[in-house]
Structures are given as structure tokens and as C-alpha cells.
Image (spheres, coloured by chain):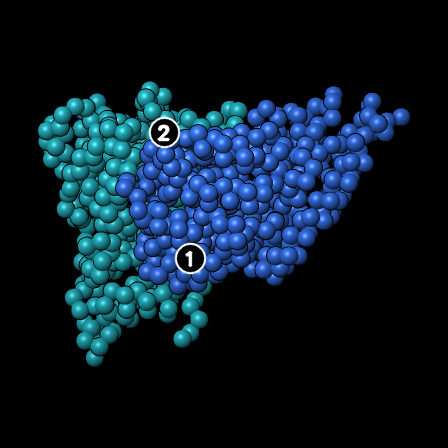
Chain colours: A cyan, B blue
């Protein structure tokens, strides 16, 4: 077996490629967690994240952990045992919200939509009106990494306002690739991850929290069940007095600062346009090969393209060949979609026309030129 | 003001210096979380950690997060609401265990020892015998980073056995610098951090869990309150089937693998000897300057030396000069010891005679040659 080609071309659901300047920034010798150089970086990270989240919220930071840590942190801070939470589920990560919220002691009402489609706000409203007592929090996933569906936030936000509930949004895959407009949409807490459209290694989770949500945290009757994820403690480290909470991952943070610099040098509009353009190029090429998109028309994410695996094609065999022969990673389906769809990520640094063309060429060799394939003799 | 010298010489409570080969390993382009290359690294990390922990436990992994995340994970997995926990507190991090355990719903009994001294097992036993019902878990800190005290584990372990309780040990600062003998001492769960004596950037938390502790987890009546830290889920990713849980920090893990290789190339005995030798060199030099150790004789950690700040000397002014003029970081005191002691770390790559000599030279310039100092004209 030949040695697999490196570096990998990461076209899966994340991690995505990391630019050399970001890797270089991550690999500088560390400084201490109370070093003035680090405080400077923390300030720059907060400044750099706010336009991405579309917010002026003060508590806009990068938590230590991956996106799932941030999801858990949001429920742990915003929910007290017995609180009612309404979760719209249109994929794997929405279902995870249900699980995580329940472990935080929430009474969870779950409203499912068909995977591949966005949520139905009317059905969510119906479910809420059947409940006894107040819904404290409405939650949904902006960019469902399991299906490639983009969830419109405005109707969910309008519902949350009518219910006088807080709104929590998972922007793990969307942040940095499509607009996230927390303040404009009335989102109270939003989290993401460093290894998707931000172009960093995995390990950090940007989070932003509205002042309304922080008031709700301050009004809690019980302590946040996670000391490690307690925003009131973490906020005291990130802002003002820099009171010690835990030893933040300084090298990763230096990398995130550099990635944010690169993002703002490119410009948000240009970055969003780039993601759209390469996504269009991919869809056109897949279409030429007869591969059909999984996510519903009009709801497709540019940075995560889900596509049906053609009948008779072996999921794992194709992905194994892509990795072994071209060093290309794409993702398989999660849950019931395992073996039925592929998930092709075009995130951050990975979102280039060159990567699209190489993947299409490789897929063509495997699928079309295979024995019995459309292009075979 | 002159530009501060880089790289920093990290002689604080952590992070410590990171070897170029480890930084290089961290900065290679990432691979996916299901990449065979990563699985190979995960296997090597587990193998490499076991001798450090002195264990053959299967669940010996590096959790995503810092040492405090691992502390919380241990309590979250091992404790159910209402369980009784006995914590020996002889410093800041023991007190944190009390806080974290309480947030996990434990009924916590806390037995304090004077900061600077080890725990008194007889007093802990007395407190336990005054309790109604079974103590599920006994917990203590092996190397108190706040005081520089080394806690003998045998008497605490004997107590835990008499109580038929699980034993949890914080080895954040000890692992890789002094022996940790989980299996020999009957420790059921032990956690550490990447940025102390292991010589990595902060962001990973090695954890090892005995089969007895895993049986207790399997026998829980309630789910682990943290989905993110649930060992039964994380274990399924690290071992065997590699079921997706969260996107592990691949770059940091590659760095940890390299650091573990370096540790085993040096050899554990040689490494422990090195920490002892540089610590002796530091203590002798401090003594020559008239600086007195804070931690009690016979209980001093080699990798973390606590020392009284001389009367009339301004803590912050000295540390600011060390950082600005020499690029040296040392730590201040925590809690009631703020402004009263310094904490000098000699951990992992930072533990070199050269660093000791430079620090002593710098302190001599600041303290002895100051106006009114012992060596002034």
C-alpha cells in the first residue's frame, strides 16, 4: 500500500485546512496565562469575533474546548433544572441539543423536521402552546452539519420573542462562511468551533452571549452545574481583571487571533462570496456526474454539501480510496444517513476551486470510470 | 519601554516551555478525526501515558480541555447527586475540588490542612467516621500547585480502602515530574494537564480510570450530567470502534504524542532525577540570598518551589521586572498567599540548570543589589 499523501485535503465536515500563517502562530513558544502579550491577543480575539457573530455583545470569547463543549456550556449556563426548553431538530446536532439539555436538567420539548429540510416554526409554536408554563429557551442549529441544511433564523427568532424565551443558535458550521446576525435576529447565545469556517485547528469554541441572556444567568436560583463552563467566572478572566480561572490554551488562542486577522483581511463579504462560488462549482460538477443533492432546494449550505450516494456504490470503499490515493477526506452520513449520503465540506481555507476540481476529478475516476459506471467502456 | 524578550522563560506554575519538536508536531496540517493516522497517534498516546500514571488501566486517554476540565470530568462521572465525597484540602486546588464536587451534586465533607503542609489522614478519618452513610469518593491533590507541597498518597489510599471508597487524585503538576503510581497506590481516577511536566501547550488533560471506577460509572442510576465529559461515550471514540463523539483537537494530540516520545526517550527515572537536581540547585541559590521556602521540609515538590517574599519587597514590581527585563515568568501566590509567596516552576522542558542560574542571577540583581538590599553599596 502506498504511503498516503500529505498534507490531507480536508473536505469533510471539519476539521478544515489551516493556513500556514495560522499553524505558525499556533507553534510559537507559549507565554503564561497572565502575560500581557496574551491579554492583547484576547482583546483582539473578542474584537475580531464580534463582526462574525454580528453582535456588539461584550461576552464574545473563545471557550476552551470544541463546539460540543460550547453547546453544553450554553445549556448549562442558560438552563436550570426544571426549566422548559424547546428544541427544533432537523438533524443529528439538533438531536444532540436535546440530549445535552436533558442532562442539564431541562424539561425538553422536541419538534422534529424531516432531515434535509429546515424546521417548521408553526409546528414548534403549536408544541409550545400545548405546554404548561413558560418556555425559557428556544434552540436550533443554524447550519446542520449532518444534512447540509441552512435554517432561516428569522422565523425561529420571531417565535422565541412571542414566547418571551431566550434564543440559542448553533453556528458551529456557519460562522465565518455565511452571515450570522445575532443582534439583527435577536439571538441570545450563539456558539461555534474553530475548525470549520474559521480555519483553525480544533480545540476552541467561540461563543457570544447577549446582555439579556447574561441577566438570566445572573438571576439563576442555582449555581451553573459546570464550574468549568461558568460564564460569570470565565468572563472575569477574559475581561477587566483577568482573574485566574483555568490555564487557557495560549498556543491555540494565538492561532485563532491570526486566523481572525486573515478573515478580516479577506473581508467578510468576499469570504461569504468565495464560499458560495466554490459551492456552486461543486454542485455543478456533481450534477454533471449525476449525483443528486440531499438537502432541499433553497436550503443548501455553501460550506457543507450533502449528496446522495448512487445506488450500488460502496460508501466506505469510495472514501477509503479518496483518502489513500488522493489524500482527500470527505464525510459519511450520520445516524440513519450512514452509507446513504456523503458530506462534502468546503470550509474556510478548504474552500478553493482547486480543491473542488481535484475532488470532482477523483470522484469521476472512481465512480464514472468504474466497471459498470457511466463512463466505462 | 523596551520590547519584552521572547521566547519567554516560563518558570511559573504552568504553562512550561515546549520543545521545538513538540511545537513542530502541533503545527503540522491537521488530519480528520476519523483518519487512520490519528487513530495511530491515539493508540500511541494511550501507551505512552500508562507508565507515567503507573497503571495498566485501559481507559487512559487525553481529554479535550485543560486540567480543570478533567477535574470536573472525574467528579461528574464518579459522583451522583447525593453521594458523599471526602476532600482533603491543603491548598487552592483542593478547595476547587470542593466547589466542583458540590456543583456535581455531591454532599462534600472537607478536611483542611494548613497550607504549606500535607493532609492529616487521621483527621480525615475522624471526619469520615462522623458521617452518616457511605463515603463514595475520597479526593486529594498530589502536587498542590498553590503551595508546592507533595502529598504522600499511601495514607490517603489506605483510608479510602478502609472506607471502601474510590480514590481520586489530582496529578496536574506531578505527572511526568515525579512518580505517580496509580496501580501501586490503589488510585481509581487520576488526571493531569499537558502544560506542566509533560511539556506541551495547554489544552489537553490526560486522565486514567481504574476498572473499579468504571464499574461504579456503569452502575450509576442517573446519566453523567456532562454529555461532553461522559467517559462511556469518550471511551467509544478512543478505543475500538472510534465512534464519533466530538472533533478531538488533532494538532494538540499530535504534539502530545511527540512529547510522550521525548519523555520516554529521556526515560522516566532520568526525568525525575533531572527535576530533583534542578530543584536542589534552585533551593540552594535561594537560600544563599536568604529566601526561605514556604512548603514544609520533607514535603517539597521538585517542580514547583514556593518561597516567601522577603519583607518590604513588592511582589508585582519584582515579577514585572523579571518579565520585562529578562522575559522570565514566575508565579505569585493564590488566595491568602497573594503578595506573600512566589511560585517558581521547574517543569518539563523548563527544568534546566541554565534557567535556574538565570533566574537566580536576575533575582540577585533585583533583590540583593536593590537600594537597601543586602548587597547594595
Q: Which residue was labeled with disc 2?
A: A224
User: Where is the C terminus of chain B found, in terms of image quarters?
Assistant: top right
Q: x, y (%) of residue A306?
A: 23, 54
Residue sitting nearer the eye, B273 or B2: B273
Q: Is residue B87 visible?
A: yes
Residue at left 39%, top 63%? B36
Q: In this view, does B238 lie to the left or right of B350?
A: left
Towards the viewer: A363 or A229? A229
Q: Is residue B5 visible?
A: no
The residue indicated by pointer 1 is B58
Chain of the residue that carries numbered disc 1 in the rendered image: B
Task: Evaluate whether label 1 is on the same chain as label 2.
Answer: no
Q: Which residue is drawn at 79% across and 31% down?
A: B290
- Residue A65 rendering spot, x and y as whole percentages: 41, 42
Q: Which of the 4 quarters of the picture holds residue B12? A: top right
Q: Residue at x 61, y 57 (%)?
A: B268
Along the viewing direction, whichever of A24 and B127 lies nearer the viewer:
B127
Instruction: Classify A230 as above or below B359.
Output: above
Amino acid at each position: 500500500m502506498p504511503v498516503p499523501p500529505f498534507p490531507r485535503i480536508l473536505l469533510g465536515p471539519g476539521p478544515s485546512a489551516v493556513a500556514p500563517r495560522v499553524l505558525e502562530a499556533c507553534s510559537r513558544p507559549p507565554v503564561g496565562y497572565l502575560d500581557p502579550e496574551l491579554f492583547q491577543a484576547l482583546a483582539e480575539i473578542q474584537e475580531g469575533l464580534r463582526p462574525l457573530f454580528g453582535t456588539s455583545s461584550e461576552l464574545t470569547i473563545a471557550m476552551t474546548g470544541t463546539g460540543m463543549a460550547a453547546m453544553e456550556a450554553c445549556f448549562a449556563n442558560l438552563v436550570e433544572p426544571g426549566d422548559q426548553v424547546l428544541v427544533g431538530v432537523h438533524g443529528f446536532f439538533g438531536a444532540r441539543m436535546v440530549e445535552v439539555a436533558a442532562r442539564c436538567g431541562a424539561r425538553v420539548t422536541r419538534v422534529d423536521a424531516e432531515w434535509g429540510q429546515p424546521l417548521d416554526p408553526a409546528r414548534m409554536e403549536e408544541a409550545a402552546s400545548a405546554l404548561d408554563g413558560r418556555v425559557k429557551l428556544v434552540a436550533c442549529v443554524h447550519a446542520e452539519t449532518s444534512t447540509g441544511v441552512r435554517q432561516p433564523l428569522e422565523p425561529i427568532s420571531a417565535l422565541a420573542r412571542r414566547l418571551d424565551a431566550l434564543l440559542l443558535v448553533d453556528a458551529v458550521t456557519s460562522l465565518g462562511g455565511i452571515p450570522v446576525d445575532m443582534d439583527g435576529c435577536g439571538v441570545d447565545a450563539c456558539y461555534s468551533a474553530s475548525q470549520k469556517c474559521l480555519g483553525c485547528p480544533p480545540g476552541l469554541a467561540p461563543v457570544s452571549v447577549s446582555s439579556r441572556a447574561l441577566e438570566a444567568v445572573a438571576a439563576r436560583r442555582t449555581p451553573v452545574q459546570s464550574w468549568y463552563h461558568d460564564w460569570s467566572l470565565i468572563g472575569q478572566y477574559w475581561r477587566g481583571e483577568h482573574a485566574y480561572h483555568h490555564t487557557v490554551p495560549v498556543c491555540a488562542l494565538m492561532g485563532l487571533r491570526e486566523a481572525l486577522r486573515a478573515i478580516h483581511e479577506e473581508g467578510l463579504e468576499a469570504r461569504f462570496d468565495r464560499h458560495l462560488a466554490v459551492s456552486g462549482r461543486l454542485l455543478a460538477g456533481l450534477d454533471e456526474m449525476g449525483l443528486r443533492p440531499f438537502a432541499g432546494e433553497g436550503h443548501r449550505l455553501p460550506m457543507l454539501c450533502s449528496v446522495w450516494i448512487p445506488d450500488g456504490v460502496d460508501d466506505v470503499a469510495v472514501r477509503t480510496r479518496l483518502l489513500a490515493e488522493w489524500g482527500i477526506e470527505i464525510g459519511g452520513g450520520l445516524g440513519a444517513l450512514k452509507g446513504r449520503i456523503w458530506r462534502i465540506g468546503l470550509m474556510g481555507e478548504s474552500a478553493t476551486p482547486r480543491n473542488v476540481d481535484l475532488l470532482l476529478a477523483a470522484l469521476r475516476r472512481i465512480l464514472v470510470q468504474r466497471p459498470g459506471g457511466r463512463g466505462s467502456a
